[in-house]
Image (cartoon, helix red, strand yellow):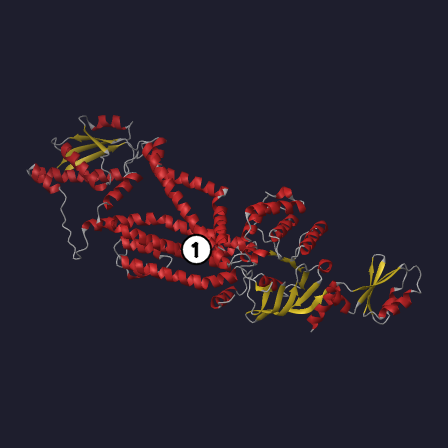
Amino acid sequence: MRNKLKFLIKTSLKRKVDTKWFKIVNIVLCLIIVCALNIDSIISFFGGDFNEKMQVYVIDNMDGNVYDVFSSQINASTTMLTTGTDNDYDIKKYDKTLEEAKEEVKDNKKIIVLEFNDSKENVMDVTLLSKEYMDLKDMTILNTAINNTKVAYSIIAYNINPEDLAKIYEGVDVNRVFLDEEKNDTSENTEVIMSTVFPVVILPFFMLTIILIQMIGAEVNDEKTTRSMEIIISNVSPETHLTAKIIAGNLFVIIQAVLLVAYAIIGFLIRRYTGGAAIAGGVSDYIVGVVDSIKGTPFMATLGYVIPLVVILLIITFIAYSLLAGILAAMTTNIEDFQQLQTPMVVVSLAGYYLAMLAGMFKGSLFIRLLSYVPLISAILSPSLLVLGEIGVIDVLIAILISIGFVYLLIKYGIRIYKVGILNYSSKDLWKKMFKAMKTKKV
Amino acid sequence: MLEVKNVTKYYGDFKAVDNLSFTVKPGEIFGLLGINGAGKTTTFRMIMGLLEPTEGEVLLDGKKIDYSVTDSIGFLTEERSLLTKLKVSEQVLYYGKLKGMDEETIMKRLDVLLEKFEIPQYKNTLIKELSKGNQQKIQFITAVINEPKLLILDEPFSGLDPFNVEMFKKEIVELAKKGSIIIFSSHRMEHVELFCKKIVILLAGKSVIEGNLKDIKKKYKKKNIFIKGDIDIDEISKIKGVYDVEEHGDEYLVKIEDESVCDDVFNKVKKYKNITKFEMEEASLNEIFVSKVGEAYEK
């Protein structure tokens, strides 16, 4: 029987992997992932002025100090309002008039002219000249810098010396105090970062769950509707058959996951060797930034046991989804019925995904915490809450134990439904039959 | 030997098979007959070990049928049980491997059987691209690829033309000669008559006729007389014991209640001219089936 199990797994897997559609889909996936990771380079390749710095010409019609003040303020505003470290602006002191500047601006949309004039009512007036509309980022930075320049200029006018002025503009050191001695501001920052990063990390899990449900369901349903099931089940037990489907389904998902990671690596390698990151603040910069911010934090130290626990929870959840998909497919008499029946499973998985994203917004929610113990969604929700510090390792262990119990019940009662379902071709009194099967040990 | 001993199967309150018993020896071809819903498929499933009888037992060579003996059983279902997306060789390999066979043996036997059924060119063709008749041939090949000790054939001639039916018959008889136990189900009684020495006719899960086909026919009182010549149908119909007269081409089929009526018919017929045939035959299995099932229905 063990050889037949191996054979069934091999055949089932081969039927999915050794097809032209699997190859075509994976070529498409590879292209999409590689392109997504290099999207900035691709955009740059087709032309554009993304890396060209904005030229900011400053006409200082006041006392000549405005240019220096504005230069320092625009640097400060850029640092405060963007994640990038590079300054996107090239500031120049412009000695000509605004009328003369117009001649230069009319042929170049990367030039902005700022004319500072005295104002009795408002300290200073500013004229901002550009060829076209400016984007929101430039507008925000320039407005902030101009307003700060006005304040700084006024302070200087009151004869405050430069050292004091520098102190005024320096950021305030906030001394973070926690009553919980185990908490610290580094891990607090990590939580904030992870609450935004984690939904992205668990997205593949959600996708793979859907693939798993569809693969097992479609295969069981196909064998049933073609009546091949009768021949198969007359040679191997329903338990062996379902086990083979579950193992093959999960192996397929693992293969697909490995391939997705491989495509991502290819994408990053291409980015690296083609001089990617053409646009500052691209995907890789973001990932590097996230990794750097996690490095050396207490969170990093916990990964040693958090990752194995999460992996165990994921495996158990995948098994639960596989069992459920197999059992539901056995109950249905055609693929349309199975598609209807798989919808609640997809919705449950989707709900888990959304809850994981919302978890950061509803900190301390008892409802979400309780849901993190619920099988099928715990694999997504528990790790999210753990990362956010909402639950501890003990809670993840509880979620694992509850999932194991759920899988046990699915095996104990679900296999009875499976045995009856795979040989049932009528949808009449279906649920009655299935409930009866659940109570009957002997089929 | 296959022994079905007092087998009863309930689905909830519904009795699908009621105290059914029969035995089939190696080399015998046994007919399991009945109208739709009579309990044939349930019986097959119990023989295959797919369903557990509520009462009674099914034994093959004295052993309960379970997954330790199913490798030596072949099963051809009424509906096509083929994975149509597979190639012929892949399908046969799949079922053969599930029977515990090795790939080399499967492929050797597949080549022989494809030659026998005159379709070697389809070895690497997708099943969905084959005609209905050729799909049935492939299904038959998958059922016999393991040279089964017990072969269950549920409507094996479905979708076959007369030429292919002959081909199948030859192969089934050959398997029986080699010692296979064959259980056969068909709605076509002429097929059953040709093959089966023993039959069971099921109605609502219960056996209404069982035993040796010859004995059943002998015991069945109604007979048929075939007459060729210029006869007066009305006069023949009026003879006591004649319950029907039918025209079959240039012959007449006179159906009589029992053998004793034959003399009365003969006495009447000998008065007519140009009589070239007068032959009494036993009733066909089809008539017996219709009559017995009809009687049971009326009850």
In the rendered view, tell whether residue A104 sits above or below residue A139: above
In the rendered view, tell whether residue A47 sits above or below residue B106: above
Residue B234: percent from left, percent from top: 87, 66
Residue B172: percent from left, percent from top: 68, 54
Chain letter, disc 1 residue:
A
Q: Nearer the viewer, residue A369 or B189?
A: B189
Q: Nearer the viewer, residue A14 or B37?
A: A14
Q: Which residue is mark 1?
A: A322
In the rendered view, tell whether residue B187 sits above or below residue A252: below
Element under label 1? helix
Q: Is residue A99 left or right of residue A121?
A: right
Q: Nearer the viewer, residue B181 or B16?
A: B181
Q: Nearer the viewer, residue B240 or B33?
A: B33
The extreme bottom residue here reads B299
In the rendered view, tell whether residue B127 sits above or below residue B213: above
Residue B23: percent from left, percent from top: 65, 65
> Is residue A341 visible to us here?
yes
Q: Is residue A144 left or right of residue B119?
A: left
Amino acid carrying label 1: it is Ser
Numbered disc total: 1
Q: Give the image quarter of residue A87.
A: top left
Q: Is residue B55 left or right of residue A401?
A: right
> Is residue A354 visible to us here?
no
Residue A378: percent from left, percent from top: 34, 57
Q: Which residue sits at x=43%, y=61%?
A: A411
